[in-house]
Every structure is written in C-alpha cells, then in structure tokens.
Amino acid sequence: MNKHNNYLAGNTLLEVKDAISSVIAESQPTDEPVLIEEGYERFNIMQYGKTYYGLSQNEGAFEPRKAKNREYKKCFSGNSIAVVKNAISAAMRTQANSIDAARWEPRLVHDNYYGFNIIHFGDKYFGISQSQGEFDINRFHRNEYDHCYQTATADEIRNIIDKVIARSNTSREPILVEEDYRGYNIVLFGDKYYGVFRNGEAFDVSRI
C-alpha cells in the first residue's frame, strides 16, 4: 500500500479499504472501541487501542474487558487487520474440515462481486463468473468453467477478481468503483485502485 499525497493506492480494492480503515482508526480516540468492518465471515473487526479484534456476531456487543479476559468463545486478536482476518479464516477452515464431506453444501458468501459470485464449499472459497451459471464442484474439477478461481479465504478471491478487473481495464479515464466508503471514494485508474478523501475535488491524475 502506497500513499500518493492524500491518495491511498493499492493493487486491490481490499488493500485500499484496509488502508482507509487504518487511517480512520488512527484518528479515533484510543480509549473507545472502533468498528473497522462489519460482517467479515460473520465476525466484526474492531480496534481498541493498538490491538485489533475479530468478534463473532453471535457474541453480542464488543466489550474490551471481556476481550482482555478472554471471556468470549469466538474472539481473535492481533496487531493488524490482516492478522485477525487470517485467524478468522483459519478457524472457518477448521470448522469446515470437521463436517462430513457428504454434507457439504455450497454457500453463497457474496452475490455479484463485480460480476462474480463468491461461494464457500467445504474448506475452500470459489469465485465464479455469473455468466458461467450455478456452481458445481464436479464441473470445477473437470475444468469446465472459463472463469472460476479457488482459494483458502474469501478475501483472496476478492483480490483475484480485483486484479482481473484492473488488468482488463483499457480506459484512460478514472473509473469510480465505490462511492463514499467511510468518507472516501475508491477509483480505478489504469491497473491501480485509489482511495480519495471526499473533499469535493475531482480525482487528479497528475498527483499519482
């Protein structure tokens, strides 16, 4: 992740979003929990002080005292957003491995992520172009899909899709990908994504 003046630049949409979340968290009072991301694999990502937490949405509201005393059944902590997300993903894979494979059913994680559906099946995640129809694990193993990707986490799938979109971008003009993400607009220009603070000014190519 690079900063171009007040632009936050990255290779993927998620890199930029994580950078935006970190900038916002750093500007908040350290004695109050800050919600970084809601609903990541059914967990909420929080920051309290210099520590990040991933709390299952089934655990109720985040309380720093309970997290410190390990009173939550499903709560992960680390010194970065990525560390917490990786811990959550590892726990989800362990849970999936404990289920009889015959009972596995595809679960839609994200409908229409820039033209792709993200599916959780077993301990893997799959990104399949919506033009390819419904997900079928047997078709995947027979290599019958033109655009279908497999990874260990949903975010890895999103990163792949982001890079596919960026590589295929032939426009010479900035493209607004997402408007007002926590006070920033996210723009695709060339093969990079940029987080631009919303101050009323247009995206300025000369500043990158």
Image (spheres, grey):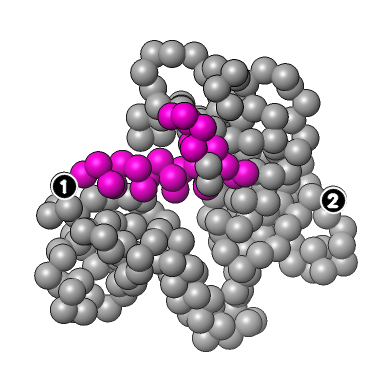
Residue visible at 52% across and 18% down?
203
Relative to 189, does residue 9 appear above or below in the rendering? below
Relative to 114, does residue 33 appear above or below in the rendering? below
Task: Give coordinates of residue 109: x percent, y percent.
Answer: 53, 55
Identify which residue, 195 or 45, lies in the foreground.
Answer: 195
Q: Which mark is residue 145?
A: none
Task: Give coordinates of residue 186: x percent, y percent.
Answer: 51, 31
Q: In this rendering, would 169 be left or right of 6? A: right
Task: Give coordinates of residue 133: x percent, y percent.
Answer: 75, 48
State which tag comes first along the sequence, 1 or 2.
1
Q: How many marks?
A: 2
Residue that carries the numbered disc 2 in the rendered image: 146
Task: Give coordinates of residue 158: x percent, y percent.
Answer: 60, 50
- Residues shaded magenta: 3-28
Residue visible at 58% across and 27% down?
208
Crowd rating for badge 2 (residues with CA inside 10 Å; few <14, some 14–19, many 20+): few
Q: Of the residues shown, which amino acid type is indicated by label 1?
A: Pro
